[in-house]
Image (spheres, coloured by chain):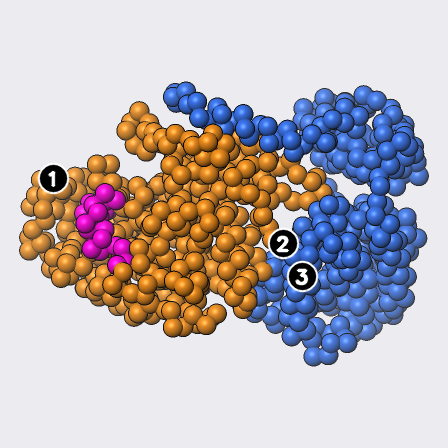
Chain colours: A blue, B orange
């Protein structure tokens, strides 16, 4: 046993607690209002209240069932406001969201399957989020950008699909990487529709347990493997080319309705860099075609777009941060330009030709940008 | 930019903030209680208490004579910015974070309780853990002096280490513009410290290489049991103790007259990653093992003597015995303060453990310390079982004096 804490520590404790209270007073006063307790079982999804003030809402989820569950907050048309997967039996999780006044559904999905057990809830209008109108403008501009990326991607994807259907291996290889640029620029938005990403951009190792690569693996990377590794185009590939187009059309039709907030834009920018850090820098993403640097560049461009739209507000709140971000975006873009002979083209060096030391340099530059970028959300809502 | 909070207040709810009362000069205690009682506690076994915080401020940096902690996370960094002001700001940010972490407090505004949409300032894995006698010690490598117009300030003693017999150095485990040695009794506390400093440093510095260490192989507290290295031998019997003021002054601390002025009260650190061929060592007869070291394996007594601390009679040892060649008497009195750790980094792809000694030695001048000793070890019988695979040398600046001071001020401030 340790000796009892001396008096000086107790005083320090009291002082520290005072500081804490002072700091969190604002939010704790309304603690009760915005917390909805959700009790999930294998056949029930109980909510502690069906009405709560618009604004910040927090779901305190407890899974009392025997299956792993997931909890969604949904718009009436089933678009996702927020979600939390993999809530194990007997565990508690907190899910937060910013919601405007209106009707919503809370869904629990025992076994993480199906439409779930639903409860209709209402966010009432009193306290809506007061937002800087410049941020609303930024959101609108980013929404238009995401839509434009999808619109521009479709013809490029169709060129790629047509080459596959023509059985023209070389033309298909050439059209592959360009067909992905718009998707890679807006990946966090695309991923917010949870069902599209696994159809078009999954890698073989990303298939879920029980899925058969022969029948369940679809999308770009399945075709990438056929073109570069197997070096042949068969009936299945032609079929998958059509399927890719129909899935991308689905994306094109839905992208404009994505739920976008200033903080999701900021964090989306950071997530694009995370994509680079975990998939591109390692060469895992495009393991057959080695076109990783094309995706890399597109991810950075998408992040930069998001950042530039938020920049005026962020700069007022944290000038040091935007100065650093400007510098690190420029540094990373300059570094990437080393790998393309022509800065107007997307013909980048094949990633298998990029040596270990150069990969580390790229990785260091990504870290140098992503770390300050992770602070953008805070700078936007300050 | 990252950590602008007042050092003396902890706005986030942290249990750790309540634990940082163990050492003198701790910011939180002094601020909150108007002069905290300085406490030095010991556990029932008489050893240093793992919960204690080691004072960060002092004329020398902590982590050199501090009683050696159980764990190490050592990191060498390369500087990527060419903006001197930015680098100086990083040193100040690092000092602020180090001051907090060594006191058992989280970095910045803490590990939770902030904006839900933003990542917390502190990574959080050391929350609720004790200060664990964490020390953070910074050093500057020779290559740093090629930057920021520092060439004229490079100490003469910060030489480029010569190539030694048997060296098989891996460039990716050698050198570095600067280093941070994190020692703590809890590995998670040491790892947390390096991780948070690396995070604060992104965009200005990058990790070049790093090393985890366990099972200290040297002791700076002779009253404690001498630890053993991975070869099973006691290591550090005759090390300089943290209390031996005269020997520290003579062999470890840079004196005012040594120059340059900015290094006064600093030291020089040699870091060597020494791979041990432990599989062949383990197949070596006890007699040969003891002959190689010049001490017996159980007690650690020198050849012909009964007790570990008996004065060794070098001539009784084989001419190529390790202790005989490394002893100050065989090196014109050359003496270093050792602070090494054992390491195992998985396997080497050939079914052998990648294991050995991460050798850390502090001295007043490497030209009179490590270099002559290492040269004399060219004929060491131990060389058959070891190989030096990583190497670095750093100038360790003096300590951070008070809350307004920062790591490297004497080097980067013109008046120093």
Q: Which mark is residue A371?
A: 2
- For label 2, the SS is helix
Residue A226: where, in percent of width, then height? 75, 63
Residue B252: where, in percent of width, then height? 25, 54
Question: Where B384 sits versus A317, above or below?
Answer: below
Residue found at x 30% / y 69%: B156
Residue B126: where, in percent of width, then height? 51, 38
Dot 3 corresponds to which residue?
A323
Camera-near label (2 vs 1) is: 2
Residue B123: where, in percent of width, then height? 57, 43
Instruction: Compute the Cα span from label 3 to label 1.
Output: 64 Å
Question: Where A24 sits versus A350, above or below?
Answer: above
Q: Residues within 10 Å of mark 3 (few under 14, many from 20)?
A: few
Residue found at x 77% / y 67%: A177
| Chain ID, mark 2 | A
Residue found at x 65% / y 75%: A338
Residue found at x 87% / y 24%: A50
| Chain ID, mark 3 | A
Q: Residues within 10 Å of mark 2 (few under 14, many from 20)?
A: some
* Residue A67 at least partly seen: no
* Residue A361 at least partly seen: yes
Dot 1 corresponds to which residue?
B307
Instruction: Compute the Cα span from label 2 to label 1.
Output: 55 Å
What residue span does the magenta drawing correspond to? B235-255
């Amino acid at each position: 046993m340790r000796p009892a804490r001396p008096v000086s520590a107790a005083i320090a404790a009291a002082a520290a607690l005072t500081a804490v209270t002072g700091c969190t007073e604002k939010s704790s006063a309304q603690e009760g209002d915005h917390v909805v307790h959700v009790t999930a079982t294998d056949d029930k999804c109980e909510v502690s209240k069906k009405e709560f003030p618009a604004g910040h809402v927090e779901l305190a989820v407890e899974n009392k069932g025997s299956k792993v569950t997931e909890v969604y907050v949904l718009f009436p048309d089933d678009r996702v406001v927020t979600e939390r997967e993999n809530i194990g039996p007997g565990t508690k999780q907190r899910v937060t969201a910013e919601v405007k006044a209106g009707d919503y559904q809370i869904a629990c999905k025992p076994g993480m399957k199906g439409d779930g057990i639903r409860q209709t809830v209402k966010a009432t209008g009193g306290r809506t989020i007061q937002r800087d109108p410049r941020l609303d403008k930024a959101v609108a501009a980013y929404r238009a950008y995401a839509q434009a990326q999808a619109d521009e991607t479709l013809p490029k994807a169709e060129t790629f699909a047509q080459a596959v259907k023509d059985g023209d291996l070389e033309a298909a290889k050439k059209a592959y990487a360009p067909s992905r640029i718009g998707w890679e620029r807006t990946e966090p938005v695309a991923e917010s529709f949870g069902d599209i990403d696994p159809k078009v951009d999954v890698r073989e190792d990303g298939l879920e347990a029980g899925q058969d690569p022969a029948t369940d693996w679809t999308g770009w990377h399945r075709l990438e493997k056929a073109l570069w590794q197997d070096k042949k185009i068969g009936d299945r590939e032609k079929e998958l080319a059509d399927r890719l187009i129909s899935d991308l059309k689905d994306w094109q039709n839905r992208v404009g309705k994505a739920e976008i907030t200033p903080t999701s834009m900021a964090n989306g920018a950071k997530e694009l860099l995370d994509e680079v850090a975990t998939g591109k820098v390692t060469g895992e993403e495009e393991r057959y075609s080695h076109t990783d640097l094309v995706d890399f560049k597109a991810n950075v461009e998408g992040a930069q777009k998001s950042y530039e739209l938020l920049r005026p507000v962020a700069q007022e709140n944290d000038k040091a941060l935007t100065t650093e971000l400007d510098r690190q975006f420029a540094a990373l873009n300059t570094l990437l330009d080393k790998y393309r002979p022509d800065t107007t083209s997307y013909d980048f060096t094949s990633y298998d030709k990029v040596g270990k030391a150069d990969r580390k340099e790229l990785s260091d530059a990504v870290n140098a940008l992503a770390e300050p970028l992770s602070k953008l959300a805070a700078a936007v809502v300050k | 930019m990252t950590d602008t909070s007042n050092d003396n207040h902890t706005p986030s709810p942290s249990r750790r903030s309540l634990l940082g009362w163990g050492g003198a000069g701790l910011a939180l205690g002094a601020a909150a209680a108007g002069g905290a009682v300085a406490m030095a506690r010991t556990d029932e076994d008489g050893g240093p208490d793992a919960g204690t915080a080691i004072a960060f401020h002092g004329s020398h940096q902590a982590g050199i004579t501090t009683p050696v902690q159980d764990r190490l996370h050592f990191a060498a960094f390369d500087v990527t910015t060419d903006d001197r002001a930015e680098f100086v700001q990083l040193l100040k940010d690092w000092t602020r974070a180090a001051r907090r972490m060594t006191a058992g407090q989280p970095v910045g505004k803490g590990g939770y309780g902030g904006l839900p949409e933003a990542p917390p300032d502190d990574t959080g894995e050391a929350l609720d853990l004790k200060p664990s006698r964490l020390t953070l010690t910074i050093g500057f490598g020779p290559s740093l002096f090629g930057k920021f117009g520092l060439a004229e300030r490079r100490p003469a003693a910060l030489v480029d280490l010569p190539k030694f017999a048997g060296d098989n150095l891996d460039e990716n485990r050698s050198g570095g513009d600067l280093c941070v040695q994190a020692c703590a009794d809890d590995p998670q506390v040491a790892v947390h410290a390096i991780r948070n400093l690396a995070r604060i440093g992104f965009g200005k510095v990058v990790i070049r290489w790093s090393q985890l260490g366990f099972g200290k192989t040297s002791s700076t507290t002779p009253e404690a049991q001498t630890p053993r290295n991975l070869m099973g031998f006691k290591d550090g019997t005759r090390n300089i103790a943290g209390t031996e003021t005269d020997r520290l002054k003579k062999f470890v601390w840079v004196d005012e007259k040594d120059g340059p002025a900015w290094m006064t009260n600093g030291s020089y650190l040699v870091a060597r990653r020494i791979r041990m061929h432990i599989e062949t060592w383990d197949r070596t007869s006890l007699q040969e093992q003891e002959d190689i070291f010049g001490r017996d394996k159980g007690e650690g007594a020198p050849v012909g003597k009964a007790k570990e601390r008996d004065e060794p009679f070098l001539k009784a040892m084989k001419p190529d015995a390790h202790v005989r060649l490394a002893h100050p008497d065989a090196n014109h009195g050359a003496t270093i303060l050792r602070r090494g750790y054992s390491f195992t980094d998985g396997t080497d792809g050939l079914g052998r453990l990648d294991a050995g000694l991460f050798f850390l030695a502090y001295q007043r001048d490497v030209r009179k310390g490590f270099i002559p000793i290492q040269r004399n070890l060219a004929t060491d019988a131990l060389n058959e079982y070891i190989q030096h695979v990583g190497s670095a040398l750093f100038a360790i600046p003096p300590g951070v004096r008070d809350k307004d001071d920062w790591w490297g001020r004497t080097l980067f401030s013109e008046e120093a």
